[in-house]
Image (spheres, rainbow, N blue to C red):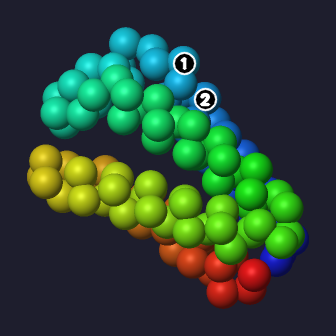
Amino acid sequence: MADILPVLLAVVLAWAGSLNLAAPDFIREEFRAWGYSDRLRILVGALEWIAAAALLIQPLRLIGCAIAATILAGVLVTLFRHRAFMRLEYPLVLLTLVLLVAQGA
């Protein structure tokens, strides 16, 4: 399980990064509704890809965890600010898994 979890997290982060970089209308609208720029969306997408890659490389795994945890903390703050409490579960679970991987790194 310890070897599979970083890979699964990397897949999730790469998928999320791809979504942010491809920017379908619903992603662009969500960032605008939150008051965030397209530049931030692109930065987040790129950082998600960097975190995903770092999670797959054992010596860089802790850096990947730090980047992923920072992104997820930003997601949680955004959801709290906008009172989207029903959407907190997914980022909370991901953050918990990232912290478990970091503990093992």
Amino acid type shown at disc 1? Ala
Q: Which mark is residue 18?
A: 2
Find disc 1 in the rendering and name its residue: 22
Asked whether disc 2 touches disc 1, contact meaning CB atoms under 8 Å apart, the reply is yes
Q: Residue at x 57, y 37 (%)?
A: 46
Quarter of the image for residue 62 reads bottom right
In front: 18, or 1? 18
Question: Is residue 63 positioned above or below 100 on the image?
Answer: above
Give coordinates of residue 69: x percent, y percent. Answer: 49, 66
Q: Residue at x 55, y 59 (%)?
A: 68
Decide if residue 76 is in sight here. yes
- Can you say which quadrant of the picture contains the N terminus? bottom right
Which type of secondary structure does the marked residue at label 2 adopt?
A: helix
Give coordinates of residue 58: x percent, y percent. Answer: 85, 70
Q: Residue at x 27, y 28 (%)?
A: 37
Give coordinates of residue 8: x percent, y percent. Answer: 74, 56
In front: 30, or 41? 41
- Can you say which quadrant of the picture contains the C terminus? bottom right
